[in-house]
Amino acid sequence: MHYLTLLALGLCSVAACAQNDSVKSIDEQSVKQASSEINQVIEADDSWSITDLRLRDYTLYWDNDGTLPRIGNDTDRFYTNGAGIELSFNPHLSEDLASRLAPSDKWTDPRFGVGLAIKQLVFTGRDITDPAPSISDHPYSGYLYLAFSFQRADEKKRDHFELDVGVVGERSQAEMIQRFIHNVFPDQDTPQGWGGQLANEMAINFNFERAWKSEPGEIEGVEFDMIPSAGFELGNVSTRAKGRITLRVGKELPDDFGPASLLGNKDHTVNASDWGSGDWSFYLYSTLGMDAVAHDIFLDGNTFATSRSVDSEPFVAMAMIGVVARYQSFYFGWSQTYQSEKYETQPSGQAWGTIMLGCSVDF
């Protein structure tokens, strides 16, 4: 940028001299003015660059309604599998840019984070061995997408902004993944209902969430806090309002805004050093939530093509229990999620388990 500016100013000067042969030299005032302008450009060229990103940690997720993550019934239906990998970055914003993104009158000592993830979700009917599922059954579908997120936070609150871009339908490779896994394990049923899956569709969704954190308390060395949150999703994949509240109890609670999850989000604004003063920490948690659903492509069907669909429920409740543990820079999470019926003909609610593994890096 500096070199281009100098070159442009030089060309302008040469052109001016060429147009006026009577100009034999540039006066001292013009030189000083040009020098001042160049210095201003150089000083102002303190903008943020993608090279300023520094890796904070990486996290692996696996959701499944049977096998290892799930305790109890071994099912294979509805939201049956989800997997993803997520990277968290410290953006190292300049003071000027940080003050613009988090004004001092609203944010105290703000911190920032950036996230990049690739995720895949798989949805099937209630019986994957049925080659002709009922029209009242959950449509088969998959969702493969990139998630780009930005966060700002202080001691009391955090904002999460996320843009998801991907594809729904056959190109999500959900059918291929499920068939491959079921072929690897010979005791698994062969999926038969993918012939009627949703059509391919470009998927764009925006998510926002504001989370608050209570003052931490302590009883006989056991710490606890509460994290309520509210937000919304908007796009051709999902349009809904949602609310959550999480209670955490443990030792050396991290200075973040709750546990990471594949269908939720992760706090990108913290390093491993924010997870307590010792080598290890852990906490138990419970989350209650409610969604007010206006649109769900996995139930309502494709936006621009004719596809299977069912009548979705306007309100969906969820409950989650889990544990998160850390040793030095490594962390592990396990949880069980229980969800009420998402569509009118759904025979019962659903449950699935989650395993989360990650490693933090301090710079």
Image (cartoon, grey):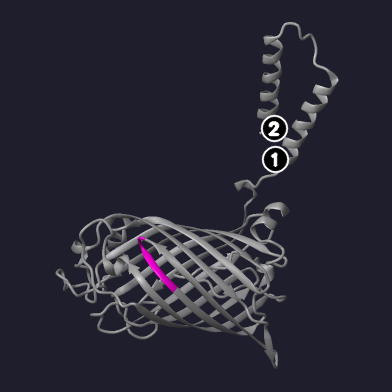
Q: Residues within 10 Å of mark 2 (few under 14, many from 20)?
A: few
Q: In which quarter of the image is residue 352?
A: bottom left
Residue 73, position in %: x, y? 33, 84
Image quadrant for the N terminus?
Answer: top right
Q: In which quarter of the image is residue 270?
A: bottom right
Q: How far apart are marks 1 and 2 (CA)?
A: 8 Å
Residue 133, position in %: x, y? 17, 71
Image quadrant for the C terminus?
Answer: bottom right
Residue 117, position in %: x, y? 48, 59
Number of dots carrying numbers: 2
Q: What stretch is highlighted in magenta?
A: 236-241
Q: Is residue 234 magenta?
A: no
Tell me what residue is drawn at x 31 percent, y 63 percent: 142
Which circle's residue, 1 or 2, is located before the other in the chain?
2
Residue 45, numbered label = 1
Residue placed furthest toward the bottom = 220
Q: Residues within 10 Å of mark 1 (few under 14, many from 20)?
A: few
**In the rendered image, the vertical position of residue 108 relative to residue 65, given as above or below:** above
Tell me what residue is drawn at x 54 percent, y 75 percent: 259
Please state which of residues 217 and 10 is positioned toward the viewer in this rendering.
10
- What amino acid is labelled 1 in the image? Asp
- On the image, numbered disc 2 is attached to which residue? 2
Residue placed furthest toward the top = 21
Residue 306 appears in the figure: yes
User: Circles 1 and 2: CB distance less than 8 Å?
Assistant: yes
Dot 2 falls on a residue whose secondary structure is helix
